[in-house]
Amino acid sequence: MTHISQRPLLLIDEHCPTADLVAESTRGMASIVRCRLSVARAFIQHDSYAAILVAVPDPDWLSLAPLIGDFAAEASTVVLSAEPGSDVALHVVRQGGQDALAGDELTPDAIRRVVSCAVVRGDEVHAMRIRARGEKRAAVRIVASVIRDALQPAMTTLARALDNPSQQHAANREALGTLQEVMMDLDEAGLAI
């Protein structure tokens, strides 16, 4: 089996025989971290996963649905259930999950296929998030640079005034005017501070 991700798979195992089939079918694709549903959120908050695989014996959609939405916000989420039912995938996708396999669909080949697709999609989303964070940091640096450049004259004037007390009143008035202009420019730009 080809290793398809540097990030691990999170296998949420609720005492389900399906989880062992999933673990065996995905062996070699990525490392696998197993946990129970009750602690899954803590695992997701502390690490990044290529995909989240939820193996449940009999989905209780009222309690599982909000969790699928939460998990799907963090990584591609696939639900795997031994319980047959054609509406399993529909429930999962409605909650933001990527895919589901249930009943007779749970074959090693099908599991590898849906997990591979989930990992590819998850890695693409992960890469986009990293790029977005980088772009946000770049934008913050640009705004900080603009603010620093706009405030520099006022700071220079204030520094000169401190060195020469006889010019302090006029310098303070000039610096205050510059600071007020900068604040108005920031307000107009939607960057009120």
Image (cartoon, rainbow, N blue to C red):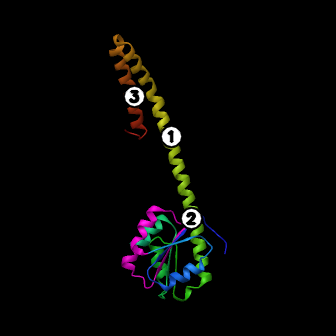
In terms of sequence position, does the residue under pointer 2 or pointer 3 come before the other? 2
For label 2, the residue is 7
- Locate residue 61 relative to residue 106 in the image: left or right: left
Q: Disc 2 on helix, strand or loop?
A: loop
* Image point (41%, 40%), residue name: 191
Q: Is residue 48 magenta?
A: yes
For label 1, the residue is 141
Residue 67, image quadrant: bottom left
* Image point (45%, 68%), residue name: 71
Q: Nearer the viewer, mark 2 or mark 3?
A: 2
Residue 128, given in percent of the width and then of the height, sits at: 56, 57
Residue 53, given in percent of the width and then of the height, sits at: 51, 74
Labels 2 & 3 near each other (Cβ < 8 A):
no
- Locate residue 111 relative to residue 96 in the image: left or right: right
Labels 3 & 1 near each other (Cβ < 8 A):
no
Q: Nearer the viewer, mark 3 or mark 1?
A: 1
Q: Disc 1 on helix, strand or loop?
A: helix
Residue 48, given in percent of the width and then of the height, sits at: 51, 63
Residue stretch rendered in magenta on the structure: 36-65
Quadrant (top left/top right/bottom left/bottom right) for the N terminus: bottom right
Q: Amino acid at mark 3?
A: Glu
Q: Which mark is residue 4?
A: none
Q: Amino acid at mark 1?
A: Arg
